[in-house]
Image (cartoon, rainbow, N blue to C red):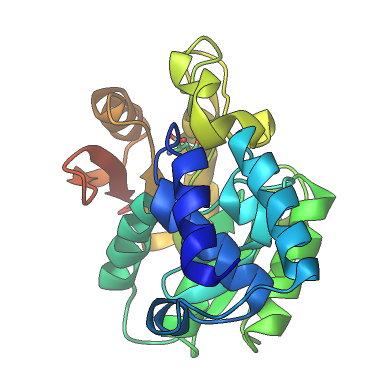
Amino acid sequence: MDFQRWLREATRRLAAGESPKRDAEILLGFVTGRARTYIMAFGETPLTATQLLQLETLLARREQGEPVAYLTGEREFWSLPLSVSPATLIPRPDTECLVEQALARLPSEPVKVLDLGTGTGAIALALASERPDCQLTGIDLQPDAVTLAKHNAQKLNITNARFLQGSWFSPVAGETFALIASNPPYIDATDPHLAQGDVRFEPSSALVAENAGLADLAHIIQTAPAYLQKGGWLLLEHGWQQAEDVQKLLCDAGYQQVSTVKDYGGNDRVSLGQRTS
Ligand code: GLN
C-alpha cells in the first residue's frame, strides 16, 4: 500500500464528511511526518505496517465523526500551529476576523489586552504574536484549557501572554485593559447545529449559553466597562443572527461607536463598542 492508494481509499471512506480529501491528507501527513507537498510529489512511497495500522485507527475514528484536529492534536490559527484537545473548542477561521478587528483598534503604544474564555489561547496568542510590546491576559474557567493555552504559549515562544483560571473577569479584579476580546459560548441549547459534524465532539461549556445563546455575551457586555480604560474597546464574536441583539446590549450598556463586522463567509460575526466615559 502506498501514499496514493491509501489516500484514494481513505477519501472514499470519508465521503460522507465535509472535507474527505483534505482530512485524509492531514491524517497521512500526521502519521508519516511528511508535508503535503511531499505526499503529492511522492505518491508511490510505501507505507510501513505500523503506519498502516495507525492510519486505520485514525480513519475509523474520523469515520465516527471525531474532528481531525482532535485526532492530530493540532490546528492552525492565524498561522500559529496550536495544540488542541477535547477540553477546548477547535479554533475557527471565523475568529481570525475578531483578531483583525482587535489589531486595527489597538493603540500604537504598548497596552494591556484581555481575552475571555481563551480556550487554546488562540485569540490571545495571535494578538501577542502580532504585538510583542503588549501584555496579553487569557482567562478560562476550565483548568485544562488554561494548561493547554500555557503550553501553546511556551511551544510558540510567546512570552507576553499569561493565562489565568477563573470565571470571566474574576482573576483580574481591579485591573483595566485597553481592549477586551471574547469568543464566548453563544449557541442556544436547542440549536440543531449542535447535532451535526465536528461540533458534537466539542465541549458544550464552550458552545452553549442560556437565554437563546445571549447570556454570556450579555454578562460580558455589562461587566466589561469596569475593566476597560476610557477609550477602550470591547470586541465580541457571536452567531450570525445575533448582531441586532448584541448591538442593543452594547448600546443599552452605554458603549459608543457600536458596529458589527462580517466574517469571510459574509455573515455578521463580530460586534464592538467603545467605552468613552
Ligand atoms: N462558531 C462556532 C460554531 O458555530 C461556535 C463558537 C462559540 O460558541 N463561541 O460552531
| Quadrant location of the N terminus in the rendered image | bottom right
Residue 255: give x, y in percent of width and height.
31, 42
Q: In this view, does 240 lie to the left or right of 112?
A: left
Residue 71 seen from this side: yes
Q: In this view, does 204 lie to the left or right of 193?
A: right
Residue 92 seen from this side: no
Q: Is residue 160 above or below residue 227?
A: below
Count of numbered marks: 0
Q: In this view, does 226 lie above or below 245?
A: below
Q: Which of 189 and 236 is in front in this view?
A: 189
Q: Residue at x 30, y 66 (%)?
A: 100
Q: Nearer the viewer, residue 194 or 46?
A: 46
Q: Given the current orientation, which residue lies at the most extreme top position?
A: 190
Q: Residue at x 24, y 46 (%)?
A: 256
Q: Nearer the viewer, residue 62 or 144?
A: 62
Quarter of the image holding residue 141?
top right
Residue 237: give x, y in percent of width and height.
39, 43
Residue 194: give x, y in percent of width and height.
52, 22
Q: In this view, does 152 lie above or below 251?
A: below
Q: Given the current orientation, which residue lies at the most extreme left position?
A: 266
Q: Which of 109 and 36 is in front in this view?
A: 36
Q: Which residue is drawn at 55% across and 74% down?
A: 81
